[in-house]
Image: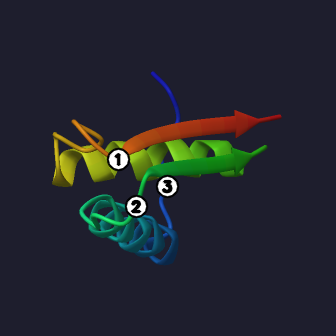
Amino acid sequence: MGLPVRRRPDVEARVDRFAEALVARSRDAAVDEIVVVGHSMGSTLAVEVVARALEIDPNLGAPWPAVCLLTVG
């Protein structure tokens, strides 16, 4: 059995706010494309943000605007 996952409430709240902002921007007709970028440990947060945004709006990025996730390092 693995170690218990300890989450920081302040980080969880920030990820939630970012996901909500991502969904809001995706509903803006003036937006062509959204690219979420995470570097190093930020990559794990970027993946979590997109996952939570998809929980909020399962149709995120369909049909438009395109939502892309880029992780580096």
What is the number of the mark on residue 6? 3
Label 3: few (<14), some or many (≥20) within 10 Å? few
Q: Secondary structure at mark 3?
A: loop
Q: Name which of mark 1 and mark 2 comes first in the sequence.
A: 2
Left or right: 61 in relation to 5: left
* Quarter of the image where one finds residue 15: bottom left
Q: Nearer the viewer, mark 3 or mark 1?
A: 1
3 left or right of 16?
right
Image location (x, y in percent) of residue 62:
22, 37
Amino acid type shown at disc 3:
Arg
Q: Nearer the viewer, residue 72 or 10?
A: 72
Q: Which mark is residue 31?
A: 2
Q: Position of residue 24 (x, y in %)?
A: 28, 69
State the CA–CA distance, disc 3 to disc 1.
34 Å
Q: Badge 2: few (under 14), some or many (20 or more) residues near its Cα, within 10 Å? A: few
Q: Does residue 57 appear left or right of residue 72 in this picture?
A: left
User: Real-space Cα distance between discs 2 and 3?
Assistant: 36 Å
Above or below, 68 relative to 46: above
Identify whether 18 is placed above or below 69.
below
- Which residue in the rendered view is the most extreme toward the top? 1
From the image, tell me which residue sits under label 1.
65
